Amino acid sequence: MSLKRQPVRVAVLGCGTVGSETIRLLRDSAKDLEARIGAPIELIGVAVKDKTAPLPIDGLDPAILTEDPVALAEQADVVVELMGGIEPARTAILAALEAGAGVVTANKALLAVHGPELYAAAQKNGVDLYFEAAVGGAIPILRPIRESLAGDTVRRILGIVNGTTNYVLDRMTLEGLDFEEVLADAQRLGYAEADPTADVDGFDAASKAAILASLAFHTRVSLDDVYREGIRDITADDVAAAAATGHVIKLLAIVERRGPGDQGTPDSGVIARVHPALVPLDHPLASVHGAFNAIYVESEAAGELMFYGRGAGGRPTASAVVGDLVTVARHGLEGTTGPGESTYLALPTLDVAKALTRFQIRLVVKDQPGVLAGVAQVFAAEGVSIETVRQTPGGPALGNGHANLTVVTHQATEGALQRVVAALAGLDVVERVAGAIRVEGE
Ligand code: HSE
């Protein structure tokens, strides 16, 4: 792309929280942005769902509003897509790329499913596709992975990439409340959506995991490749049990690369998963509170890096969007592009059963001779080594003759650990499996 026109003609698709803050930032910083880009920016249009509906920003010339994002996208030098969802965002972005415009988007759901198609269109037309705001909101994480770590080998990323679930889990931890109670309050306060499915069931984090894995491991990873569990089943008891062993529960997005022979496994590939996990209190991710995000990167030469900040919100996300816009506009003026899709490793995605992890398993058992031996036998049969066992009396709530057993394992495959949990549930002496949660970050 080489911008023939000056100023740089920018179209913003979507005028919700992030769209309106992006427009505000473009206005407030116009002089600085002009100096940084080397040309002024002209906002040529804003695509909205309904031109007659009130907008969260004042002073927009009604003449630049349109309900046709595709037609608008075809007229710009840089298109900023902030509508979210798959359609019409996909069609509008493809139209922009085909028309030779660079594209900035925050649309994680679209990228996690249609990323390769968008990259291909960008490459074919010699234009940029930038999406820093799609993961971690304001946090610079994608450009560091794509560019700053291009000389290194990323082995694993652990991320708290969903602010809603971190807020809910954090309040459950601090206040000892149950999930439903905190969720209802979070919805009332505007921290959680009226339909919280995308956040609490892990879809949002899974899209971000797919994007992180694709960039970090130079391999295509899509939403379907990501194993996903949300936080709906986490109870106040789970949180209390985590605290009792020096942990806190976080919803983690974990993407890791396996080489043949790594950690004793013959498999080579990528594993991507999103699920709640116990994180030790001394791990940096344990101190990520409220709606904040953090991404912890383990790479061969750099070692461990952590990126922390606001993962959502209009103005923080707009910061990442406008940062991309500056880069894309500069490239347009220079007639260059930034890095495109890098998939040269083409690693297979491995089943989550092959993931190496640890479990904390909480059991209510009969308190009688031989129970511990029987329980231990189940672990031994699957080759799973026990790290710690903690027994506490059942107390009146469990009835007489019962005990609580909390077992923390050493590392084993997810498959073996799941078989252990299933076998324990079938033991006569096990009244119930009260919880089975992975332990990560040690
Ligand atoms: N809903 C997301 C969150 C922000 O709660 O973090 C946008 O991805």
Image (spheres, rainbow, N blue to C red):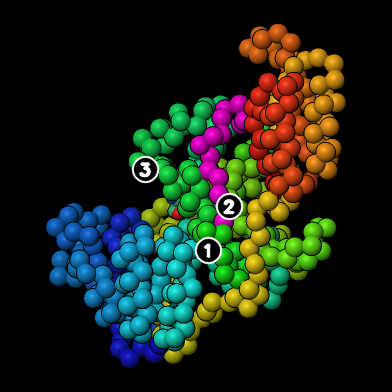
Who's the residue at 59% across and 75% down the image? 343
Q: Position of residue 50 (x, y in %)?
A: 18, 59
Q: Position of residue 390 (x, y in %)?
A: 78, 26
User: Which comes before the other along the chain, label 2 or label 3?
Assistant: 3
Q: Who is closer to the viewer here, 32 or 184?
A: 184
Which residue is tagged 1?
222
Q: Secondary structure at mark 2?
A: strand
Which residue is tagged 3?
195
Q: Amino acid at mark 3?
A: Asp
- On the picture, is 170 further left or further right than 435? left
Residue 227 numbered mark, or none: 2
- On the picture, is 148 further left or further right than 90? right
Q: CA distance from mark 1 to mark 2?
A: 11 Å
Q: Who is closer to the viewer here, 9 or 124?
A: 124
Image vertical order of residue 280 relative to residue 306, above or below: above
Report the mark closest to the observer, 2 or 3. 2
- On the picture, is 159 further left or further right than 32? right
User: Which comes before the other along the chain, label 1 or label 3?
Assistant: 3
Residue 291 visible at all = no
Residue 364 numbered mark, or none: none
Residue 112 visible at all = yes
User: Which comes before the other along the chain, label 1 or label 2?
Assistant: 1
In magenta stretch: residue 117? no
**Contact, mark 1 vs mark 2 (Cβ under 8 Å):** no
Q: Amino acid at mark 1?
A: Ser
Give the magenta-colored segment's residue range. 226-241
Q: CA distance from mark 2 to mark 3?
A: 22 Å
